[in-house]
Image (spheres, helix red, strand yellow):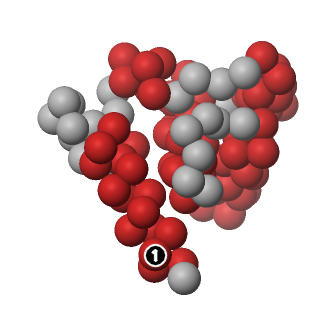
Amino acid sequence: MIRQRVIKARERQHRRFANEKIFSNAAMTPRMIRAYCEIDSQSEKMLENAMRRLGLSARAYDRILKVSRTIADLEDTDTIDSNHVSEAVGYRSLDRTYWT
């Protein structure tokens, strides 16, 4: 079941980037992030608060958006919502806690 979700998410990314020279969310440039990772105002506020609270950089902001896009892809949805952003921030804070 998990394998099928991942295959479906990869197919979604393949379609999204058909006209780009990349094949996955991880390879998105900042321009692509702005185009493919739109978030609503509630998610934006949540992300800004997390950035301040955790002392994250602009690079971390972009990485969180990429992970949020991937989480949304795994849920087979076109839009990134606050749950996706929240989950991505959680992974980033775990990364900072245990791997730095």
Q: Nearer the viewer, residue 62 or 8?
A: 8
Q: Nearer the viewer, residue 87 or 9?
A: 9
Estimate how packed mark 1 is, as few (under 14), some (14 to 19) or many (20 or more) residues with alpha carbons within 10 Å.
few
Question: Residue sitting at 59 percent across and 46 percent down?
Answer: 77
Q: Is residue 27 visible?
A: no
Quadrant hosting residue 20? top left
Q: Is residue 71 above or below residue 42?
A: below
Quadrant hosting residue 53? top right
Q: Is residue 90 left or right of residue 6?
A: right
Q: Is residue 40 left or right of residue 76?
A: right
- Which residue is situated farthest in the bottom direction here? 1
Q: Is residue 26 left or right of residue 95?
A: left
| Number of numbered discs visible in the structure rendering | 1
Q: Is residue 28 above or below residue 4?
A: above
Q: Nearer the viewer, residue 68 or 47?
A: 68
Name the image quarter holding the C terminus.
bottom right
Q: Is residue 19 visible?
A: yes
Q: Amino acid at mark 1?
A: Gln
Residue at the spot of label 1: 4
Name the image quarter holding the N terminus.
bottom right
Q: Residue 34: image x %, image y %?
A: 47, 18
Question: Residue sitting at 37 percent across and 24 percent down?
Answer: 32
Question: Residue sitting at 50 percent across and 69 percent down?
Answer: 5
Q: Is residue 77 above or below residue 75?
A: above
Q: Secondary structure at mark 1?
A: helix
Q: Nearer the viewer, residue 52 or 76?
A: 76
Q: Is residue 20 above or below residue 90?
A: above
Q: Residue 46: image x %, image y %?
A: 82, 28
Question: Residue sitting at 55 percent across and 39 percent down?
Answer: 78
